[in-house]
Image: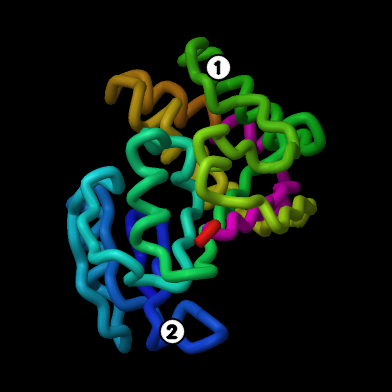
Amino acid sequence: MTKLGNMIFCSPAAGRRCTISFIKTAADISENQIAQAALSEGMKIEYYAVPAEKLAFPDESFDVITACQCFWHFDHAQIMPKLFRMLKSNGSLLVLCMAWLPFEDEIAGASERLVLKYNPSWSGAGEPMPPIEIPACHTEKFDLVYHDEYSLQVPFTRGSWNGRMKARRGTGAFLTSAEILAWEQEHKKLLEQIAPMEFNIRHYAAAAELKARK
């Protein structure tokens, strides 16, 4: 199995059932994330800092490729033929995602509204629970053979939820240092008013399996 960014590739050595213990190669566009991942112990993994679109693994290298929380960031017209080429006959592309549900969870909704106060252009707010959208170009070489969507509760504390919201693309990656400080102060006060010390946030998880047509 090989992990690319938030993608995982399964090598033939994984056998018929592929689990996280068979990760063989990992790549991510972020050198910092690769450095953190390289600290993992007990796993023989080769790490690469490279955009997914620039992968150059040999033909039919993997049984399964898994893209988790990253699929929508790809240049699909460019990467689709590469994913198809790297998969073995009857190989699968698994797409996974998970996000909180702001319209169903009061705390998540309030936190999102505060992010939008500081960053009205944030496009990651208001997540519903739809099936994963597969760009049309993938149907040229893949068949959608399975999909599933379900809700779940994820535990947080005030501190961990504040950190989760701070790490969002619309917050920590967008706001200035002064804006982040102001947002965080206001967010912590908000959580003191609306959230207990420990709580759950309703999320949804979705999966889609695309089978290579070869």
Give the mark toward the camera: 2 or 1. 2
What is the crowding at mark 1: few (fewer than 14 residues within 10 Å), some, or many (at least 20)?
Answer: some
Where residue 90 sits: x, y (%)? 54, 69
Q: How is the image coloured?
A: rainbow
User: Relative to 179, does residue 184 appear above or below in the rendering?
Assistant: below
Where residue 99 sits: x, y (%)? 63, 44
Residue that appears at 59% across and 55% down: 210
Residue 21, disc: 2
Look at the numbered disc 2 and give the secondary structure of its residue.
Answer: helix
Quarter the N terminus occupies: bottom left
Can residue 129 be spotted in the picture?
yes
Where residue 78 sits: x, y (%)? 33, 37
User: Relative to 126, does residue 60 appear above or below in the rendering?
Assistant: below
User: Which residue was labeled with disc 1?
Assistant: 116
Residue that appears at 58% across and 31% down: 189
Look at the numbered disc 1 and give the secondary structure of its residue.
Answer: helix
Magenta span covers which residues?
188-212
The residue type indicated by label 2 comes to: Ser
Q: Left or right: where does residue 182 sit relative to residue 52?
A: right
Q: Residue furthest front?
A: 214
The residue type indicated by label 1 comes to: Leu
Quadrant in which residue 125 is drawn: top right
Magenta span: predominant SS is strand
Residue 105, disc: none
